[in-house]
Amino acid sequence: MRKTNAITEGAVLLALFIVLMLVAKYAPIIGILALFVLPLPFIIFTIRHSLSTALMLVVAGSILSVLFGSITNILLALMFGLSGMVMGYFYKKKLTMGVLVGGSLAYTFSIIVSYIGSIVFLNIDFIQDSIELFKDSIKQSKAILQSFDASGQVNQQFEQLEEGMGYITTLIPTLFVTTGMVFAVITHLISVPILKRLRFELAPLKPFREWRLPTSIIWYYLISSILLMVKLDQDSFLFMAVLNLYFILQFFVLMQGYSFVFFYSYVKGWAKAIPIVILIASLIIPIFLYLIRILGIIDLGFPLRRKILKK
């Protein structure tokens, strides 16, 4: 009886997944939202059933996705199916932080596999194609602006831009990790209200103001910063590894800084809109972003919150 229920429920959720996948591919605006809802059928199924049964659902979803579209659909099904399965497992165990960490890792792994698969089987490298397209746009813009510029400042600005473009290929791992984290957070934010509506019991996530990353991040960040000051061979694997580690750690330090801003705002009883305005302003004005990063380093290295609470 239990096996029959699992098959019936799996068939219904697979049908829902196929519909969402078609909406995500062919609907212009609502398709973006549907893209982040794609893991939901697998999340629900994993919460209710075992991991092995959920894995069978992912395989079945991958096969069906090809029947309802092109061969590229299998990459889409594997990415959101595996990520949904991992996030569903942590929802089932009531480990909300594990949902974000596990979801980020699952998304990152799926994105890497999809990227390699598109190169090997479809001979499509969408990152390199995008870079070449962007380079062509830069050349066209440069040619137009040079005709209006007599001082030569345009050349200097474009040289800096072209130099920055050279690091994009090196930073592909950071791009994958960041994309994985963003996808996991958005999926979580969309899934939680729906799962609560379906009467699933979920463990509450700590408020953002209470987030505290390990202090060891400071030392890794410091070491990677020092190594980048040393003139490493830019074509070496060490340079690529250190540069990617630096940017990923910089992101974590930044998150810690934002967490402190929300914490301080809460302790002082400020309006909820104030830390949000600070966050938006820091994304627009680079100097604020630098200050937030410093706050993150101080918050990780010193018991600043404890002293504020004592006062």
Image (cartoon, grey):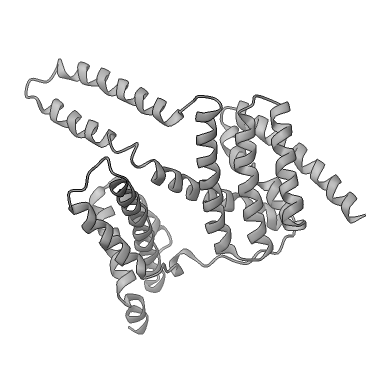
Q: Nearer the viewer, residue 59 or 85?
A: 59
- Residue 155 vertical position relative to residue 295 in the rendered view, above or below: above
Determine whether 277 is above or below 134 in the image: below
- Quadrant in the picture for residue 199: bottom right
Q: Is residue 92 above or below residue 110?
A: below
Q: Quadrant of the C terminus?
A: bottom left
Spot occupied by residue 277 in the image (x, y as percentages of width and height):
36, 54
Quadrant into which the N terminus falls: bottom right
Location of residue 284 in the rendering, given as x and y in whole percent from the top left corner = 30, 45
In the image, what residue occupies the spot 13% across and 30% down? Answer: 156
Residue 192 in sight in this render = no
Determine the residue positioned at 51% across, 35% down: 116
Q: Residue furthest bottom?
A: 310
One can see residue 91 in this view: yes
The percent coordinates of residue 140 (x first, y second) are 26, 17
Query: Quick check: 277 left or right of 106?
Result: left
| Residue 270 image-quadrant placement | bottom left
Q: Is residue 55 left or right of residue 298?
A: right
Name above or below for residue 74 compared with residue 92.
above
Q: Nearer the viewer, residue 7 or 9?
A: 7
Relative depth, front residue between 205 and 140: 140
User: Does residue 260 appear to the left or right of 144 in the view shown?
Assistant: right
